[in-house]
Image: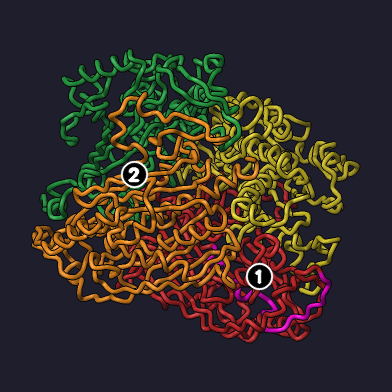
Chain colours: A orange, B green, C yellow, D red
C-alpha cells in the first residue's frame, strides 16, 4: 500500500528504473480542470536527467503521455493515468549491481525484505520513481490554478555542502531560481556553487545540501488534528523522497535555542485579517495553516553513488571492492527542487479537498 | 479522519482537555497478547502532569480503564478501548481563552477553520490529547514483548535550550534516563539542566529542546517503498506531536556538509550478518530498516504558554495584552520523551504487521 | 482495521457484549452541528432489548454518554466519543458458551481465527455491537438535518417468515412504521405478524425476514466510480450487520426475469428536473444517485439462538447437545430496522462529504 | 478514491472505453510469485468482447502488457502496472451519446455529478473498465496458486431470464462451465440458453440473469469483525460491477422463509476438523470463513442498451427518441463470470494478507 499517497487527492506511482516505464495514477482530482501533456512536461523537464552540465548525463526525454481521465482538454473526475516510457535501458551496464550491495543504497534492504530485486539502475529505488510524484504535483498545480489561484509553491536550493544562501525565504523569486542550473535563489552567487559541484564531480565524489520551500497564498484552515497536522504530512511527504535525512518547519532546530518569549509569533491585525509579526511557526499553528507563508527545509545527504573505490559485501557474503561505473549526479539538489514542490503540492491538494469536505461549505 | 494513525495497527484518539475524558481505540492488535491496565499505566505516569518539580503542577492521576478488547488478561484481536477521565476541569480558569488568541497556540487556526472550539485548556489541541497516543504505544510495546522481544525503543532528552548532551545515542541506558526528572541520558549532568529549567520558570519564560530516540533490535525489512518509507512514517508520527518543529534521522542536517565518500556506510560481515561500520543512515536504507540502531531526533519549540505579558488580538478583532495565568510546563521535553517513544512504537507496530502480511511468511 | 467504517465520515466501534461497555468514535463530522445525548437516545431506544413484548426481555437501558467532540451543544469537528455502559452482565449465565460452538453462530470461527474469544453473550459478535453503528447513524441524521434537510431515511419490515407486506415502498410512512412494535409498514396488518412471532417464540423457534429501506430527498450525485458505487457501499454496509444474508436494490433478483425493454427506466422532464417514470434502478445509476427514491432490501436469516435442542461439537472435539438457556429475540427484524437506517446514514454521510470534496463546489 | 479496491492487496484501475487504454496497478502482492502476461491473458480472454456468437461483436484483442513489478518472471513486491490498449475506437459512432441520456445508463448521473463526461462508448462507465479488475484478480489467482494452492474460485451462470440451472453449486465443474459459450454449469442444457439469447438479440432486446460463485478450499479464518465481514466485502465487490442489482450468500433471500431450527447448520467432526452438515451459512459465520464452500449469487439486470426505440431526454432538456446503433451484448452474463471471479479473488487476497498480518503467525 506504500505506493499510494493521499486520502482524497490520491497518487499511486509505479515503475522501476529499468522496465517498460514509470507512471502515476491520480485519483480524486476535481472535474473540469484544464489539463494537457504540456502542463505536465514543464515540471518533468525540471526533474529529468541531462538537463544541465551539473546533473547526470543520462539521456531521457521523459515525454509523458496521458492515457485516461482527460477529455477534450479537461479533467473528467476519473483517474488520470500518465506514463513515461523508459528509453535508456542498458541491462549490462548494471551487471555488477546484481550481486554487490552498494554502500548507503537500498540494495541490501530490498534483497533482505523481498528476496528479489530489480537490480538494474536501482529498480524501484531509483530517483526515476519520482517521475510519478512530479506528475501528481503538476496536476495539483493546475487544480490550484483554477480553485485557489493565489496559492504558489516555490522551492529552491538553500545549501550545497557548506555553502549556504543568505536570502530570506519570503523574498525568493521563482524566476530567479529557475534562471540558473543549480536553482540557487541568488543568481549572482550561483556560479560559485556550480563550480563547487563540478569540482567535486571531477574528484569522483558527491555533495549534499538543503532544499527550502515556501508556499504563498495558502488558504487559512488546511490541516487536521491530530495525526494529520499539515506539518506532519509535509514531513512525511518530503522524507519519503530518496536521500532526504531531515525536515524542519519555521524556526526548526534553531528555534529550540530560543526562549518562549522570543519565539512566540505575536498576532496583529492587518485590516480585518489576523496576521503574525514574525513567522517562527512557519505558517502552521496547531497543525493548521494560518495564512502566513509556509516555510520548511529538507536535508539531502550527499549522493551515495560515487566514483571512488569503496569496500562492501555481495549477496553471497563475500567482501568486495566497488568502483561505480556509469553516470550519476554529483549533487541531487537541483533536481530535488521540483520533487519537493511536487510532494508539497500533493499534501496541499489533499488537505484542500479534505477541508472543503468537512468544513468548506459551512465555513463562511 | 486525522484522528486515526496507522493502517494495520491502528489507533484512534479522542478527547479534549476539558470534557468527559480522553482515550484511544486500538484496532488490529494481534490476539492473545497479555495486557492489563497496569501495563498501560507505566508510560502514562511518565507522561502525566505533576510527576516532578519541573513540569506543570496540574494534578491528574491519569488512571486508565480498559473497556473492551481484553478478556481474562489477554487481547482478543478486537478493538481495545481505553479511557482516562478528566478530573481537574475548571472552566472559569480558562475564561480569557474564550476570546483571546494566544500567540503561537492553535486558538486562531481552530477558530478560523471550524468556527467553534473548546477553548477550555486548549480543547483538542491540549497536550492532554497525547494520552491516547501513549496508550497505543504501550499496547504496541506489549505486543513486541511477545512477538519481537529483542526490539526496544528508548527516547531521551538530547538538548534543552543551548545545553546539549554529549553521549553517543547507541550507548544510552533507559534506566539512567528514567533516573532523573529531566530524562537526561547522563544523570550526572542532569542537575544543571534541572536548574536551568527552574530558573527559566521563575522568569515566567519557557525552553525548547531536542528529544532523541534509539530503536534497538529492530528486525531487518520494516518500511515500504515509496511513500511509506520507515523514516517518512517516523517523521510524520513525531511531527504530529504538539510543539515539534523538526525531524532528522541518522546524519540529518549535519550530514549535508559531508562528501559522499565520507558519508557512505561501508558494509561488512559479522558472521553471516550484513552490518555497516558507521550508521549515518540511522538504521534505515531505501526506506527499509537494515538491522542497525534506528536513531532520530525531534526538535520541540519553547512552550508557547509563558508568564510574561504578550501582545495579541481577540476573536472580535481587538488588540489585547495577554498574561497567562494558571499552570503550565516551562519545558515540555521531559514529558515529550514517552510521547516520542509512543509514536515510534505505533509506526514500528504498523510496519511490523505490514511486513508480515506481504513478505513475512515467504521470507524465510 | 475492520472496526472502522467510512472514509470521510468515519465511525469506529468497540466493545463486547460483556465487559465495560460498547461505544463509537465518530470522526469527520462537520463542526457546528447541534448535538446532544437526547438526539442519540431516540434511535438507541428503537434498537435496545426489552422495548416490546416481541423482542428479547434482556434489560438494558442503553443510556449513552458523549465524552468528547461536542461543546455547548454543538459539534467541534473533532472526534465524537460516545459510550453505553453494559449493565446486565451475568458471566455465569453464559458458562456453557465457553466451550460449546453454537450452530450458525460465530463461536467456532472466532475461536479458530483468534485462538481466544470473549464467550460471554457472544462477545464482539453480539448484536450489542450495533449500538456503536446506531450512534454513528444518529449523528449523521443530525448532520443531514442541517446540511440536507430534505433527505430522510426510513426502513421498515417488509417480510417476516412467509408473510410479505404489500405496500409500495415509496408510500411508506415513518410514523406508521413506528406505530407498531414489529415496525410493519401497514399498522392494520401488524397484529397478525406479532401473533406469528409470539407463536414461534412459544415453540422455542425463530423467524427470519426482510427489511426494506427508502431514502427520500437524496441529492443527485452521491456515489463514486468504480468500486465505491453507492449501491456497493450500501450492500457492504448492511451485509456487515449480524444475520444478514442478502441485499438487492431496485428491481433486484426479480428484475433478472425482465427484458431490457421492460426494465429500462424512461427519462422525462418534470419542469427542469430530469426524472425517471419507473424506478427499477432503485435511485442509483452507474453507481451515482439520480434523485429518485433509493430503495433496497436486506434479508435476515432466522435467529440462530433457539430454545430447541441442537446437536453440535465443543472446543475439545466432543459431540454435545445444546439447548439454549437465557433470553433472546425470536425475530430480529423489528430491531434490525434502526440498524439498517444507521448503516444507510453512514454510507450517505460519507458520500455526501466525498462529493462535496471533489465536485461540491465546482458543480453549480 | 473510489478507483482503488482493497487494503493490503490493493488494485487501482483507470481508463475509459475510448482513450489511450485501460489498466490497473496492483500494489501489495507478495514478492517472488511467478507472473507473466500469459497468466493474465487467460481471464482477459474470458472477459473480452467478440469471444463468441452470443456476446458483442466489438473487436478488441485485449492484449495486456506488464510495465512494472515483475522481474525475470517473478513479482518484485513493488506495484504491478498492466495496460491494455484501446483499439477499436470510433468517436463518431457514439456521437448521439454526446447529448442524449440513455435510459438506465449512467449518462445522466455522470453529467449531473461532474458536469463533464467522456461520452464515447460510456467512458468510465463502460464494461471495458472491468479489464483492470480482471487483471487484479488474475494476479491474485497466481498468488494463491503458490501460497494457498487448495483454494479455487469458480463462477458460472445460474440463471438467464427465467431459465434456472438445477445443479448443486458444490458439484459444479469449472471445465464444464468453460466448455460452452454461455458458461452454463450443465453443458447439455446450454444449447437452449444460447438459443434464447440469440432470439432475444434478434428482437433487439436483452436479458438479465444470475451468476453464482463457489470458493473451494478457503482457509478458515478470513474476514474481520465488524464492518469488514467477508460477506460484506464480497457484497461490495460484486455490487460494484456494472449492472449488478443483488447479492445473496448461502440461503440468501430464500432462507428468510425458514425457521431457525431448520436453518441452523449443525456442527460435526470429520476427523479433527469441525464441519457443518448443511451450508446455509454459505461458508461464512460471524463474518469469518469456516472452511466450507463459500457460495453466493449475484443478480444482473437485463442489458440497458437495446435495439428497440426508447423515449428519453437530452442534456439540453428536450424530449428525444433513442434507437441504439452499434454493437452490444444481448446478455452480459457469460462475460460477467470472469468479472465475479476477479472481484472474489480480490476480496480473498486482501483478507488472506490481513489475516496473516494480525493472526497468521500466532495462530498455529
Between B224 and B70, the one lying in front of the other is: B224
Image coordinates of residue B8 in percent, x first then y, are 43, 46
Vertical placement of C159 versus C249: above or below? above
Q: Which residues are magenta?
A: D318-343
Left/right placement of residue D341 relative to residue A201 reads right
Of residues D9 and C128, the one nearer the viewer is D9
Label 1 packing within 10 angstroms: few (<14), some (14-19), many (20+): many
Q: Where does label 2 land, which residue?
A: A168
Q: Is residue B8 in the magenta section?
A: no
Cα gap from disc 2 to disc 1, whole angstroms = 71 Å
- Disc 2, SS: loop
Residue D130 against residue D4 in the figure, above or below: below
Where does the image place residue C197, in percent across and percent down from the top left? 79, 40
- Are the residues flagged by discs 2 and 1 from a single subunit? no
Tell whether C32 sits left or right of A346. right
Q: Secondary structure at mark 1?
A: strand
Label 2, residues with CA under 10 Å away: few <14, some 14-19, many ≥20: few
Q: Is residue B346 visible?
A: no
In the image as oriented, which residue stretches furthest toward the front? A188
Checking the image for residue D21, the label placed there is: none
| Residue at mark 1 | D158
Q: Position of residue C217 (x, y in %)?
A: 77, 50
Amino acid at each position: 500500500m506504500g505506493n499510494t499517497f493521499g486520502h482524497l487527492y490520491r497518487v499511486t506511482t509505479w515503475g522501476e528504473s529499468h522496465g517498460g516505464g514509470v507512471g502515476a495514477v491520480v485519483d480524486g482530482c476535481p472535474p473540469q480542470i484544464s489539463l494537457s501533456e504540456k502542463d505536465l512536461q514543464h515540471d518533468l523537464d525540471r526533474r529529468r536527467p541531462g538537463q544541465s552540465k551539473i546533473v547526470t548525463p543520462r539521456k531521457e526525454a521523459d515525454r509523458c503521455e496521458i492515457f485516461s481521465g482527460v477529455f477534450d482538454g479537461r479533467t473528467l473526475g476519473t483517474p488520470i493515468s500518465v506514463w513515461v516510457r523508459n528509453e535508456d535501458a542498458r541491462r549490462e551496464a548494471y551487471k555488477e549491481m546484481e550481486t554487490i550491495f552498494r554502500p548507503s543504497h537500498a540494495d541490501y534492504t530490498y534483497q533482505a525484505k523481498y528476496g528479489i530485486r530489480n537490480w538494474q539502475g536501482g529498480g524501484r529505488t531509483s530517483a526515476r520513481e519520482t517521475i510519478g510524484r512530479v506528475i501528481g504535483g503538476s496536476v495539483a498545480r493546475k487544480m490550484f490554478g483554477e480553485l485557489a489561484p493565489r496559492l504558489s509553491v516555490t522551492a529552491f536550493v538553500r545549501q550545497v555542502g557548506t555553502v549556504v544562501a543568505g536570502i530570506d525565504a519570503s523574498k525568493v523569486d521563482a524566476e530567479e531560481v529557475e534562471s540558473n542550473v543549480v536553482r540557487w535563489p541568488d543568481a549572482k552567487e550561483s556560479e560559485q556553487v556550480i563550480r563547487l559541484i563540478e569540482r567535486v564531480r571531477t574528484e569522483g565524489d558527491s555533495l549534499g545540501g538543503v532544499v527550502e520551500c515556501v508556499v504563498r497564498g495558502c488558504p487559512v484552515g488546511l490541516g487536521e488534528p491530530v495525526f494529520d497536522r499539515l506539518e506532519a504530512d509535509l514531513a512525511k511527504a518530503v522524507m519519503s523522497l530518496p536521500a532526504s535525512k531531515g525536515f524542519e518547519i519555521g524556526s526548526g532546530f534553531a528555534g529550540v535555542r530560543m526562549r518562549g518569549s522570543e519565539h512566540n509569533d505575536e498576532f496583529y491585525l492587518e485590516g480585518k485579517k489576523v496576521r503574525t509579526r514574525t513567522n517562527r511557526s512557519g505558517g502552521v499553528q496547531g497543525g493548521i495553516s494560518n495564512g502566513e507563508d509556509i516555510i520548511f527545509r529538507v536535508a539531502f545527504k550527499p549522493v551515495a553513488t560515487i566514483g571512488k573505490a569503496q569496500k562492501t559485501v555481495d549477496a553471497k557474503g563475500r567482501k568486495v571492492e566497488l568502483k561505480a561505473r556509469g553516470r550519476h549526479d554529483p549533487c541531487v539538489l537541483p533536481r530535488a527542487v521540483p520533487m519537493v514542490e511536487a510532494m508539497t503540492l500533493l499534501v496541499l491538494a489533499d488537505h484542500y479537498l479534505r477541508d472543503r469536505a468537512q468544513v468548506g461549505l459551512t465555513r463562511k
